[in-house]
Amino acid sequence: MGFRQDVRDDFPAGWWRSAARWRAGFVDMGTRTLIVIASALMPRRIRTALRARCIPTQLAPLDDLLDAYLAAVLVNLGACAAAAWWLGTGSPHVLVVIAIAAYAIANTVAALIVIIIMSRSRLTQAAEWAVLDYIDRHAPRRGRPPETIAEYDAERLKNL
């Protein structure tokens, strides 16, 4: 697809007046922020990843959030490094620093579980993921009817 089609898909006519679109954007930003800050407090997503590790159609919603899980690993490893530095300076609040480090380690482990499961699934079931990626890339969005051959093909694959 060309640049014009990508822009049209991302910003349809009148998008700034759509309350549902703004709401969906804020929910997406909030979800990504929560994943970065509190991955360990979202056990349902981790449980979904563990139970459906061989079923790409059930893992597909987590695939959109993979960048947030990667950011969670980096941010929480930074928090662990800061806590280690804090402990080395002789901070009087040792228990607080240890609690922050433990929380950051739990978040890191939770995010790494999802990243490893997604990576393993993408490597072992590449053909199924290729179909899902094709559907995601070419399917008409927001209730628009299909207009191109690729959109009709993606619509057909989605309904199989």
Image: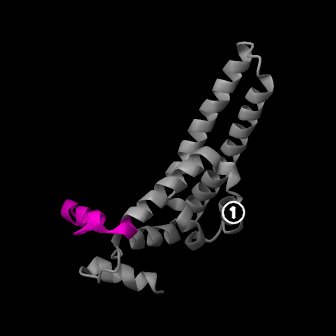
Q: Quadrant of residue 4?
A: bottom left
Residue drawn at point x = 73 percent, y = 16 percent:
91
Is residue 20 located in the magenta-colored stretch of the structure? yes
Quadrant housing the N terminus: bottom left
Q: Main secondary structure of the magenta part?
A: helix
Up/down of 145 relative to 18, above or below: below
Q: Which of these two is toward me, 73 or 158?
A: 73
Q: Residue furthest top?
A: 89
Q: How is the image coloured?
A: one colour
Q: With 122 as the anchor, is 103 left or right in this view?
A: right
Res 1 seen here: no
The residue to which callout 1 is attached is: 44
Q: Quadrant of residue 73?
A: top right
Q: Residue 14: give x, y in percent of width and height.
A: 23, 68
Q: Residue 19: give x, y in percent of width and height.
A: 36, 68
Q: Residue 149: give x, y in percent of width and height.
A: 26, 81
- Highlighted range, magenta: 1-21
Residue drawn at point x = 31 percent, y = 83 percent:
152
Q: With 74 as the anchor, is 90 left or right in this view?
A: right
Up/down of 6 relative to 128, above or below: above
Res 23 seen here: yes
Residue drawn at point x = 41 percent, y = 73 percent:
135
Q: Quadrant of residue 89?
A: top right
Q: Residue furthest left?
A: 4
Q: Could you say whether the residue bearing mark 1 is in a helix, strand or loop? A: helix
Q: Residues within 10 Å of mark 1 (few under 14, many from 20)?
A: few
Residue drawn at point x = 55 percent, y = 45 percent:
70
Up/down of 129 relative to 140, above or below: above
Is residue 137 located in the magenta-colored stretch of the structure? no
Please state which amino acid type lies under the numbered disc 1: Arg
